[in-house]
Image (spheres, rainbow, N blue to C red):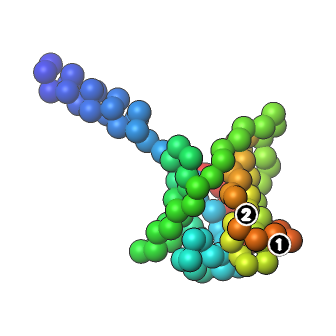
Amino acid sequence: MKKAFLLSFFLGGMALFAADAYRIDLYKPLNVNGTELKAGSCKIEILDNKVVFKQGKKTAELPATIEHGQQKYISTSVMAGDDREPEEIRISGTTTKITFAKADAGSPAAVASGSK
């Protein structure tokens, strides 16, 4: 009984600190805070006011603003500027939109799609 209580307490505590994680597919390389992510599968985790990008052994993070819209997005899209820095990510099957502060103005271009 005591073990079951401790296990449920531990798992409940982990759920409190769990981040939202999604897998996206990059069609073109993406430059995240000086780290170049190649075209292919990439994992993103939303943690408070930042997003962590993971691809293989590479990890990079950027400050972000998380917004929730009225309708769910039908596909995941990543918009990036001419410098290939991410500007916006919309996540398929959710109302989540992630926006990143722009260092330079550039025309956004779609570079990814994917799902949770």
Q: Which residue is mark 1?
A: 106
Name the residue: 57% across, 60% down. Answer: 62
Residue kind at label 2, given as amino acid type = Lys
Percent x, y for residue 37?
A: 58, 77
Quadrant for residue 28, please give it: bottom right
Percent x, y for residue 20?
A: 53, 45
Name the residue: 15% across, 27% down. Answer: 3
Quadrant for residue 9, please give it: top left
* 5 lies left or right of 12: left
Residue kind at label 1, given as amino acid type = Gly
Q: Which residue is mark 2?
A: 102
* 37 lies left or right of 83: left
Residue farthest to the top, as pictured:
1
Where disc 2 sits, the SS reads: loop
Q: Is residue 73 above or below residue 30?
A: above
Q: Is residue 5 above or below residue 53?
A: above
In the image, 59 versus 114, the foreground residue is 59
Where disc 1 sits, the SS reads: loop
How many neighbours does mark 1 have within 10 angstroms: few (below 14), some (14-19), or many (20 or more)?
A: some
Q: Are marks 1 and 2 in contact (CB under 8 Å)?
A: yes
